[in-house]
Amino acid sequence: MDIPVNVAVIGCGHWGKNLVRNFYSLEFLACVCDLDKDQLGRVKKQFPGIQTTSRYEDILANPDIDAVVISTPSHTHFRLAKAALLANKHVYVEKPIATSYLETQELEILADQTDRVLMVGHLLMYHPVVTRLKQLIEEGYLGTIRYIESDRLNMNPNRSDRTVFWDLAPHDLSMMMYLLGQDPKRIVSVQGSRTSDDGLIDIAHIELEFETGIRGHIHNSWVHPVKQVKLVVRGSERTAVVDDTLSAPDKLQIFSNHAPPEKLTPEYLAIEPLKLECQHFINCIRTGRKPKSDGVNGLKVVQVLETAESMLVENKAGIAPTPIAGT
């Protein structure tokens, strides 16, 4: 018999509303918390029977709530996640898990001490297209991997993060690490531009070198008028292109590196990635298994971002390869 799990979602705005929808459809949603009373009003209308509150303390004090899902601005993630773990709740926190290596390390240690599941929302690790591509890479279908590049560009006027790469690059980094089965060992260069009045870095490039010498490139932008979500994995025999702006089955395409340029469109399961991610969180609570995107995975991503940010602050970008902080 499956163990019942009651979930509370904290933050039901831009992305949180999708988490609310999925946990409701999976029949695990018990409560939604948000400071915006209008948002809570919409939840009551759309999801009858779901409790709502504007007080996070109500969630922590409720013994019937087993798990907390945090979808709030990134600078609040550490504080909210720590409080939930101390209240003996399982925690799913949207990316990034925290905004410093030490904060993330503290959350991982606390999760181990309390024997609670700690999971970070690295959504693309659960994307069926990315899962299928990982299978092809591991089968050697692309040959020896030489290069990986991820572009994540959009127009975002609502900037709650310090730089664009704290907002977007967690997706790119976690996906690259998952596909390659290895971590970046150093940042070769970082470039950032401020093009808007708020003074935040809204265009960024990060050049990485992975453990086996594979080069990786990440390009993020908050000011691109045309949305672009594209991954390129270059192998010695074939090159894979994932374009998440296209409809199935064209999201994943494989091209031969040799003439004539053979093209293949592999089959994959057409399931909403967020639904799979939410199911994975519940399964980990029920079985006690570590999530694919656990605290250690979140820690590795934060290490890279924190190092990249320090390179920009110290104006070291492009001068010398820099080891990842904490390694």
Image: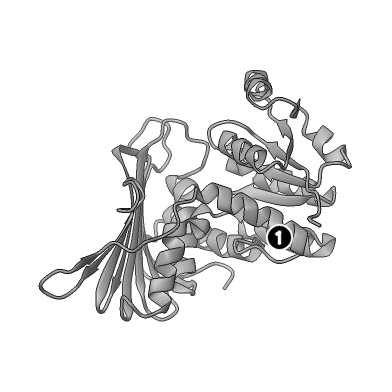
In this view, the residue in front, 240 or 180, is 240
148 lies left or right of 118: left
Vertical position of residue 116 compared to residue 320: above or below: above
Query: Dot 1, how many residues are within 10 Å of its Cα: few (below 14), some (14-19), or many (20+)?
Result: some
Quadrant for the N terminus in the image: bottom right
Amino acid type at image mark 1? Cys
Asked whether 154 or 319 is in front, the reply is 154
Q: Which residue is mark 1?
A: 284
Q: Position of residue 257 (x, y in %)?
A: 19, 73
- Residue at 40% of width from left, 43% of height from top? 201
Q: Nearer the viewer, residue 118 or 205?
A: 118
Quadrant occupied by the C terminus: bottom right
- Place of residue 112 in the rendered image (x, y in percent of width and height, measured from the top left): 78, 65
Q: Secondary structure at mark 1?
A: helix
The answer to whether residue 155 is above or below residue 112 is above
The quarter of the displayed image where residue 149 is located: bottom left
Residue at 46% x, 71% y: name it.
184
Q: Position of residue 299 (x, y in %)?
A: 61, 62
